[in-house]
Amino acid sequence: MHAEPPEHVGIDLAERSYEILIGARIFDAPHSYAGLGNGGAAVVVTNTTVAPLLAERLLTALRTQYPRVLLVTLPDGEEHKTWPTLNLIFDALLQAGCDRATTLFALGGGVIGDLTGFAAACFMRGVAFVQVPTTLLAQVDSSVGGKTAVNHPLGKNMIGVFHQPLRVVVDLDVLDTLPEREFNAGLAEVIKYGPIADAAFLGWIEANLPALCARDKPALRHAVKRSCQIKTAIVAQDEREADLRAVLNFGHTFGHAIENGLGYGRWLHGEAVGCGMVMAADLSARLGLIDAGYAKRIRDIVQRAGLPVVGPRLGTPRYLELMRVDKKARAGEIRFVVIEAPGRAGVRGAPDALVAQVIEAHTA
Ligand code: NAD
Ligand code: GLY
């Protein structure tokens, strides 16, 4: 059976421009990787969960394009998004005699993508890498835009660099094996794009949530494509997050506090972002930017996507302490992504007392 032609979404970043291919049965199609090789080895980085599902098929495809193909399998989990795990990649590359012509392939979710991209940025001062995202979250968000990082005990994604991939290969079929909880976590990042950038897209998500939750392929294809279009448009204007790109962090200030406060891996990143969006939308309403009805609409969509809408009771002082360790914070002031109008977001500070009201209202 022939793989159907993928759709292409381009990201315009001058000499760092690349394409996102979106389709079915494309991650193991040799032509998805045509023209990328530069004579060096292809190193697939994945984890213990994804390797048995998908690695051999990707290795087989890459063997047609690269002279040498290697596999590096890391432990699975957000708690492994750390320096020691990064070192496992460097150990494998050096032990295999890899050189500057090496291309890394991130086969997995956002954790593998962030680790592999960081490793690619650092190995021999920078080698190429390709994103092959296998979770919904990675397909609609983390594989695009070149943010790479590891977590620090004091803060999430605190140590990292910008390093753009050569290509992103999004195969919707690989989502078939994704557990429901992980799939729903990915929906949080899809929902995010509506309030921050495209009011009509939020309406589309609202109407098509049952189809999305049933993993209907045409619905998924539209959701992934529109998400990638919105993200690429924002990143193309502000690659290094001087300003505009921060809106992609809607829900993340509260969300990162939840993830870190509970210990990485207890709540999934997308779950924390979903609940964080509910809190950030309420903050936007309390700041008088949107009406309470719009905030409730966001809450209802997050809940219908099977995501938590009530945060853990870490205590307001702990939330505030955790949120001060955020890349958007300036001189100790927490800055939040707020919805300024349906489909438009901005970044601003808010009085602690108001933030405390939000925390009290949405945690238990
Ligand atoms: P993840 O990478 O931990 O993957 C979720 C789980 O699904 C893992 O257990 C994984 O092994 C498993 N899995 C992956 N693909 C599978 C498949 N096809 N079938 C079955 N199981 C599969 O989590 P995630 O939600 O993909 O990513 C979250 C991470 O992404 C966080 O660390 C977050 O900080 C990061 N992130 C980065 C960016 C960015 O711009 N770089 C953006 C958003 C999120
Ligand atoms: N996920 C946030 C960003 O890429 O900027």
Image: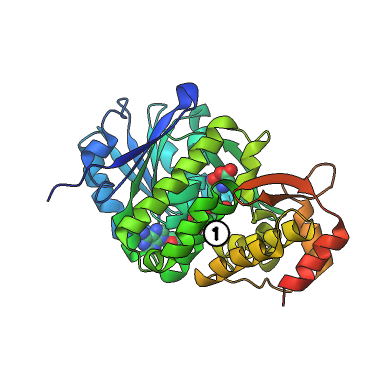
Tell me if residue 174 comes above or below residue 293 in the rendering.
above
Quarter of the view holding residue 177: bottom left
Tell me if residue 254 comes above or below residue 222 in the rendering.
below
Residue at (63%, 65%) from the top-left corner? 275
Which of the pair 68/302 is nearer the observer? 302
Chosen colour scheme? rainbow
Residue at (57%, 31%) from the top-left corner? 237
Residue at (61%, 33%) from the top-left corner? 240
As shown in the figure, which amino acid type bears the numbered disc 1?
Glu
For the question of whether residue 90 can be seen, the reply is no
Q: Is residue 68 left or right of residue 209?
A: left
The residue wearing badge 1 is 78
Quarter of the view holding residue 47: bottom left
Q: Residues within 10 Å of mark 1 (few under 14, many from 20)?
A: many
Q: Is mark 1 within 8 Å of ligand 1?
A: yes
For the question of whether residue 9 can be seen, the reply is yes
Tell me if residue 7 comes above or below residue 269 in the rendering.
above
**What secondary structure is found at the residue carrying circle 1?**
helix
Quarter of the view holding residue 48: bottom left
Which of the pair 122/148 is nearer the observer? 148
Residue 250 in the image: state x and y as whole percent.
64, 52
The total of numbered circles placed on residues is: 1
Residue 221 in the image: state x and y as whole percent.
35, 52
Residue 56 in the image: state x and y as whole percent.
25, 52
Q: Residue furthest left?
A: 1
Report the quarter where the C terminus lies. Answer: bottom right
Residue at (72%, 45%) from the top-left corner? 347
Which of the pair 340/264 is nearer the observer? 340
Q: In this view, does 264 lie to the left or right of 96?
A: right
Residue 103 in the image: state x and y as whole percent.
38, 34
